[in-house]
Image (cartoon, helix red, strand yellow):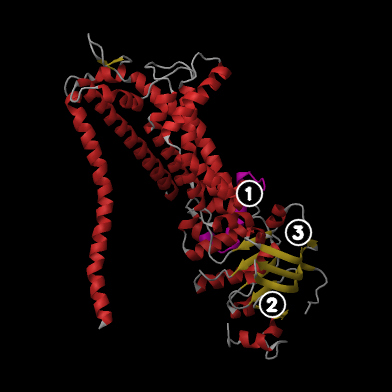
Amino acid sequence: MVTDSVDPHIAFRNVSVSYGRKVALDRVTLEIPRHEIFGIIGPANSGKTTLLKCINRTIDFAPLARVDGQVLVGGEDVYQMANVFELRRRIGMVFPLPVGLPLSVYDNVAYAPRMAGLTRRDELDALVETCLRHAALWDEVKDRMQLLGTRLSGGQQQRLTIARALSHRPEILCLDEFSIAVDPVTTMKIEDVLLDLKQQMTIVLVTNLVQQARRLADRVAFLNNATLIEVGPTEHVFSEHPAERLTFDYVRGHFG
Amino acid sequence: MRHAAALRLSRLAEPLVEAIIRLCGWSAIFFVFAIFFFVFREGAPMLFGALDLGEFFTSVNWRPDSRIQAQYGVLALLAGTASVTALAMLLSVPAGLGAAIFVSEFCPPRVRETLKIVIELLAAIPSVVWGFIGYMVLNPVLIAVTGAPIGINILNGGIILALMSVPIIMSVGEDALKAVPDTYREAAIALGASRWQVVYKVLLPAAKNGLLAAALLGIGRSVGETMAVLMATGHAVQIPHSLLDPVRTLTATIAAELGETVEGGDHYRVLFVIGTLLMLMAFLVNLTADLVVKGVRGKQNG
């Protein structure tokens, strides 16, 4: 099933990924429209993370990974791009467990802008503050900017990684089960942030919380066992009659 | 019943295992102190007796066999150890850490295994063989290249020591880099960092304690190395003025002279004082390392 969008931000055309003999994605075709939250749901090991890694080509670092088919970002094949670092800078990535780089709170957020050549202190300060505010973390860390990032609490660290992912002003934000290590209150805060950010960027949200996808996503894709079962508007996927019986069973918690 | 018996057994076995492990831990401390004690004991009568400590540290005259007036000044020997070690570190720390970074981050997996085996083989070569290489191979090469009258000198000893230290620095350094979680690499890569930026901005800061430990192990190896420097540095007691001067180190002096001394004599005891000095130096290097590492950590927490 193909969405009705004319100009998709991200498109998968018949994408298959395997790690050695293990097939992680099997001929997936889908399109992700601009300025939407695109939810990806499915049980563990269904290929959700692999799908994310194809978008910014961090799949290249997985041992034995083999990618077939086309992944298009902004209409351009990611494997035809001359500068893969440039691609990655256009995409923010948030991992399941927060990864505070071994730097201070400030330097964590300033890391990517500095790599991109931003050195003026006042500009950096402003950018760091904006990102931390966006990630709903500013009030908690504004007096502790030189603290080592890894010394924040789990929920704070996860918001720090979101701030960091926003620091290079990405056009796409990918989140991989961001709420695993985060308490429910913080999760709700981040969810509000995401709804805000939708105005500025496309958000791809991999989640194992079906209700989270239902709350946030405009469109949902359901993966099971490396195969795309169904993709469509959230209200349809979560309705009494989604296109596939398997989808119904999964979102109602009958398996997975 | 069976379960209860197993439980009882484990109640007996656990304290036993714990006692054995405890013994292993304490024995390391015990042996260090025991070695220090015995070395110190042999040197002590001289240290607190006839030895003039002022002369010991400031005189360049090492004339233990003089029939008129034996002189025990180790300044030249200290200078020998310091110069050879410094040169060796200057060469081996960059090379060793560079090799560690290459093997851990840039090397294709298949080449990595081969390279590691070869480099670790380098570490297994006995030091007397290294000394032999310095004496027979490097000596004529240095004479030809530098025009020095003799090729067994600081440069020769430094190069040989550097070659001996590189495998240690590389293998400890690589372990330190491998201990950095892959998630750090992923996170930095996802932010658009190039491989070199990942190394420079993320891996080196994250692994710096381990890398420092690697460098210090290399220094320890260099200071303590005996046979290779005995053969490769020329064994001349003097304050060096250039890289091409032969020198003699503290360790080489002990190795070369201990067999010639009368047990319990002044010369014999002075050699043990030198041994004590070497142990104190090793202790100082390790202590400094600990303080530096702790200092770095303390600053980050603040």
What is the chief secondary structure element of the magenta stretch? helix
Q: Which one is in front, B75 or B115?
A: B115
Chain under callout 2? A
Say above or below: A178 vs A253.
Answer: above
Q: CA distance from mark 1 to mark 2?
A: 33 Å
Q: Which residues are magenta?
A: A112-139
Say which label, 3 or 2, has the lower sequence index.
Answer: 3
In this picture, is B63 found above or below A69? Answer: above
Q: Residue at x 64, y 51 (%)?
A: B193
Residue at the spot of label 2: A227
Q: How far separated are the C-alphas under marks 3 and 2?
A: 22 Å
In the picture of the structure, the residue carrying the numbered disc 1 is B195
Q: Name the chain under label 1.
A: B
Front position in the image: A13 or B76: B76
Mark 3 chain: A
Query: A158 or B142, which is in the foreground?
Result: B142
